Image: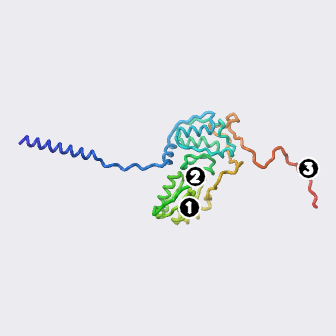
Amino acid sequence: MNRQLVFGGVFVLLAGVWGANRFMAAPVPADPPAASTPIESWRKTLDQTCDLVFQNRSLKEVVDELKERTKIPIHLDPNVMNFGINPHDPSVNIELKQVKLQDALRRILAPYNLQYALTREGIVISSEDLVVARQLRQRVRVDWEGTPFAEVIRRLAAETGANLVVDPRLKDKAQVAITLKLDDVPLESAVRLLAEVADLRALRMNNILFITSAERAERLRADADGPVPSGPPTPGTIPNLPIGGPGIGFGGFGGGGGIVVPGFPGIEPGVPPVPEAERKETPAR
């Protein structure tokens, strides 16, 4: 009797272990992680803290080193030469400890009056107006059928890195189903058309496209900016450049700050104005 009980208990135990092994050998597959866009990965990199030390380095050298260290494509606008900035001048002297990379980049660019922005091509560096234009004039493809408006805007923002903001007060109006197909259009134009299809309006405020109701858009229109301009800046156009800056000096001035800017076109040097007393009135004929 006891042998039968022991044998039966061992059989039950082995059966339980065998069944458990079968269960453990075939786990339920986990859901695959959501694929992140390159821009989301670059944002995480820019949010990391770092130490940076640059001594007598040119802006071009700094950009190239940051590109190598971060593995992010960084594009310095060649038109900065038109702003009186020599990217090859060894003028960057800065030491930063435990700062976020995005803050460090802003501090490096600030004395040059330059900005940066994320796009699908990577980080672009230029004047503020041109950075906004590069970001909002990225070419996009729109092909949506029955997709909620807010979701369409969210995906466009994730794809392009642009600041696309849907007014949270819209609530259900932001969930209207969108069906629209566009090929190779500027991002700003696509957002404005999508908003129109949803019976909403898009306003540009600097580097932000804000989507709200038609009524609120009308009230905000006086404070909004127009569509971004297209094309490169006119040669000789010089932004309002600051002189010097904490921690960074500009070569040619003993590191004390200063930027040499080209002369304004159309003015011939060396020709002094004629004094008022020497001017003669031309007799009428």
The image shows residue 119 at horizontal and vertical percentages of 55, 49
State the image quarter where residue 5 is shown.
Answer: top left
The residue wearing badge 2 is 135
Quadrant where the image shows the C terminus: bottom right
Residue that protrudes farthest toward the front in the picture: 183
Residue in front for this viewpoint, 37 or 167: 37
Closer to viewer: mark 1 or mark 3: 1
Classify the position of the N terminus by image quarter. top left
Disc 2 and disc 3 in contact, CB within 8 angstroms: no
Q: Which mark is residue 249?
A: none
In the image, what residue occupies the spot 17% across and 42% down? 14
- Depth order, front residue of 201/246: 201
- Which numbered disc, 2 or 1, marks the residue that appears first in the sequence? 2
Could you give the CA–CA distance between mark 2 and mark 1, rounded to whole angstroms?
Answer: 15 Å
Residue at 35 percent of width and 49 percent of height:
30
Amino acid type, callout 3: Glu
How packed is label 2: few (under 14 Cα within 10 Å), some, or many (20 or more)? many
* Real-space CA distance between mark 1 and mark 3, rounded to the nearest whole angstrom: 60 Å
Q: Which element is circle 3 on?
A: helix
The disc labelled 1 sits on which kind of residue? Arg
Q: Is residue 136 above or below residue 110?
A: below
Residue position marked by numbered label 1 in the rendering:
192
In the displayed structure, does residue 162 sit left or right of residue 253? Answer: left
Q: Which residue is mark 3?
A: 278
Instruction: Residue 126 in the image: state x and y as whole percent.
Output: 62, 47
Q: Secondary structure at mark 1?
A: helix
As measured in the structure, the alpha-carbon distance from the residue carrying label 2 to the one carrying label 3 is 55 Å
Quadrant of res 183: bottom right
